[in-house]
Image (tube, rainbow, N blue to C red):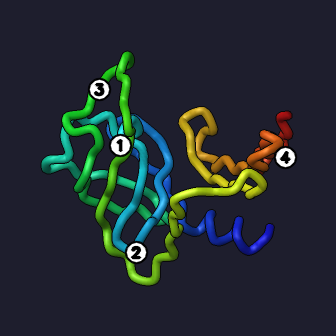
Amino acid sequence: MDPLSTLLERCTVRIKHQGNIGTGFFVTPQLILTCAHVLDEKSAKNQMVRFQWKGACHTGELIALLPDPCPTGPSKDVFPDVALIRRAIPETPCVLLLPEFMSEDQLYSWGYSRLAKGERIAAIEQAHRRRVWNRPSAHVAT
């Protein structure tokens, strides 16, 4: 595994909130970015979120939800679909977000899904070729 993939994996958390499973990642040592639909909450007020990082369970405070109030339920149409969770953990790596990418850039993603039964899913996507590699099963979709 190349160093960038290793770092990205170390920044990723598995969120388990009210029966939902999804992915978040540290964007600062104190903040986790995830999608609002993962949490399925109407508001960020007084909400605590459980997540796993490096095999340990943690709890963070939901501090921002966009949109707020947020639609919930099976027919929800969420945009911009963003949530921020605050939890200070010492020596946490984080992902630096850039405002844009070039068409030749390689994009990396790590994630968790209820469909993966607890295993992480990894993808590397070449922006101009639209190919995706999934790990750990090494499935290639073109």
Q: Tag 2, which secondary structure?
A: loop
Q: CA distance from mark 1 to mark 2?
A: 21 Å
Where does label 3 land, which residue? Answer: 72
Q: Nearer the viewer, residue 56 or 61?
A: 61
- Residue at image x 42%, y 43%? 35
Characterize the local packing of mark 2: few (<14), some (14-19) or many (20 or more) Cα atoms within 10 angstroms: some
Q: CA distance from mark 4 to mark 3?
A: 34 Å
Q: Is residue 115 above or below residue 25?
A: above
Image quarter of residue 40: top left
Where does label 2 land, which residue? Answer: 29
Residue 17 shows which numbered tag?
1
Residue type at the position of mark 2: Pro
Image quarter of residue 38: top left
In the visual, does 90 lie left or right of 49?
right
Residue 138 shows which numbered tag?
4
Q: CA distance from mark 3 to mark 2?
A: 29 Å
Q: Is residue 11 above or below residue 21?
A: below
Residue 96, given in percent of the width and then of the height, sits at 52, 69
- Residue at image x 24%, y 58%? 61
Q: CA distance from mark 4 to mark 2?
A: 31 Å
Camera-nearest label, 3 or 1: 3
